[in-house]
């Protein structure tokens, strides 16, 4: 399964509170009532909200100077399914006009590998996300091999059991950069980073321990020195909010009401997607 990862931020004149309202309420309402999107194009949709008050002494890599407010994670069966959604009438008319953030983005198509997951793991909670750059002159294949075969085991050995609830490597999925031409993502940096690393924790204190414990910190930085460009890498610290997930078999999210023809959502959708202020055609009086 392919992941479409987006790091984004609010318009410079807007408050974060307003931005999170637009994204967390209005955007979600559009997502779950757009038939071509919910459960079809995007099999899983997760929101990440940047946590305030994060300081450098909590992080191995600094926050981005771009001040990203959020990260979105969409799971798809294929690139073709995503391309189809962007041309679907309901997506174009309902989703695309809701432009509520800045034009700057970090965009990445990736394939995820779960390196570690606690027994009984449940999504949500505190996450540390690293957007990684490879060392200059290093091929992407060499970067991925080192990341998976040497660095990931070193991280797990350094953190030991109980600190990290889940650890995922997202490797870059190459594709035509022109895919986003003419869309709201046209100004975004596409696959500018070589990998996205995700860590789940029980608390911010546990997250900060990776930096504040000298043994853990030194082991991770020593391992990264062989393949990561630390100067081009940044962190995000977020809370994870799973909007829906249809990848879990019998534990998946409930079906979306928009796909039930007898639901209120479907009835409203059948009223049409625009032109509500245009009077309907009336029959002439002499029509038999």
Image (tube, rainbow, N blue to C red):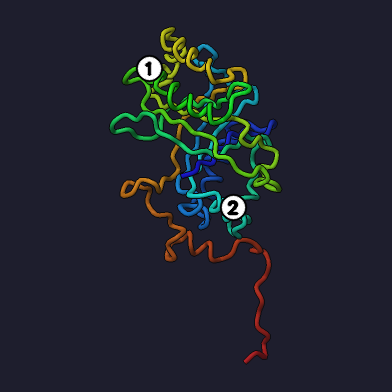
Q: x, y (%) of residue 70? A: 56, 32
- What is the secondary structure assignment of the residue under circle 1? helix
Left or right of 250 in this view: 76: right
Q: 11 and 44: which one is in front?
A: 44
Alpha-carbon neighbours of circle 2 within 10 Å: few (<14), some, or many (≥20)?
A: few
Residue 131 picture location, percent across and down? 55, 27
Give the residue furthest to the top.
214
Location of residue 175 in the rendering, given as x and y in whole percent from the top left corner? 60, 43
In the displayed structure, does residue 250 sit left or right of residue 6? left
Label pair 1/2, CB-CB below 8 angstroms: no
Above or below for 39 versus 221 = below
Left or right: residue 65 versus residue 266 is right
Give the residue pinned by disc 1.
159
Q: Secondary structure at mark 2?
A: helix
Q: Nearer the viewer, residue 15 or 75?
A: 75
Image mark for residue 29: none
Q: Which residue is mark 2?
A: 83
In depth, the one of 104 and 180 nearer the eye is 180
Residue at 52%, 57% in the rendered image? 36
Where 62 sits versus 74, above or below? above
Q: Residue at x 52, y 31 (%)?
A: 49
Tally the numbered discs: 2
- Mark 1: few, some, or many residues within 10 Å (few <14, many ≥20)? some
Q: Compare marks 1 and 2 and give the one earlier in the sequence.
A: 2
Give the residue at x 70% y 32%.
Answer: 13
Q: CA distance from mark 1 to mark 2?
A: 40 Å
Q: Residue at x 38, y 35 (%)?
A: 123
- Give x and y (percent) for residue 18: 60, 35
Q: Quadrant of the C terminus?
A: bottom right
């Amino acid at each position: 399964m392919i992941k479409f990862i987006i790091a984004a931020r609010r318009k410079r004149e807007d408050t974060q509170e307003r931005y999170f309202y637009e994204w967390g309420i209005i955007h979600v309402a559009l997502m779950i009532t757009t038939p071509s999107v919910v459960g079809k194009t995007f099999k899983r949709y997760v929101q990440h909200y940047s946590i305030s008050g994060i300081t450098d002494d909590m992080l191995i890599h600094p926050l981005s100077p771009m001040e990203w407010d959020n990260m979105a994670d969409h799971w798809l069966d294929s690139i073709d399914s995503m391309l189809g959604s962007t041309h679907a009438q309901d997506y174009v008319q309902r989703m695309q006009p809701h432009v509520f953030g800045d034009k700057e983005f970090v965009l990445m198509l990736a394939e995820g590998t779960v390196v570690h997951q606690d027994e009984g793991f449940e999504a949500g909670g505190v996450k540390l996300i690293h957007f990684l750059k490879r060392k200059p002159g290093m091929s992407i294949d060499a970067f991925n091999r080192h990341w998976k075969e040497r660095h990931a085991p070193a991280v797990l050995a350094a953190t030991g059991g109980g600190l990290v609830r889940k650890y995922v490597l997202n490797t870059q999925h190459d594709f035509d950069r022109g895919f986003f031409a003419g869309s709201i993502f046209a100004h975004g940096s596409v696959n500018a980073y070589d990998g996205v690393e995700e860590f789940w924790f029980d608390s911010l204190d546990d997250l900060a321990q990776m930096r504040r414990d000298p043994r853990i910190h030194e082991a991770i930085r020593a391992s990264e020195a062989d393949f990561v460009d630390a100067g081009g890498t940044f962190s995000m610290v977020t809370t994870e909010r799973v909007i829906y997930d249809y990848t879990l078999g019998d534990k998946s999210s409930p079906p979306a009401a928009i796909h039930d023809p007898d639901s209120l959502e479907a009835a409203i959708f059948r009223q049409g997607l625009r032109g509500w202020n245009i009077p309907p055609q009336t029959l002439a009086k002499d029509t038999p």
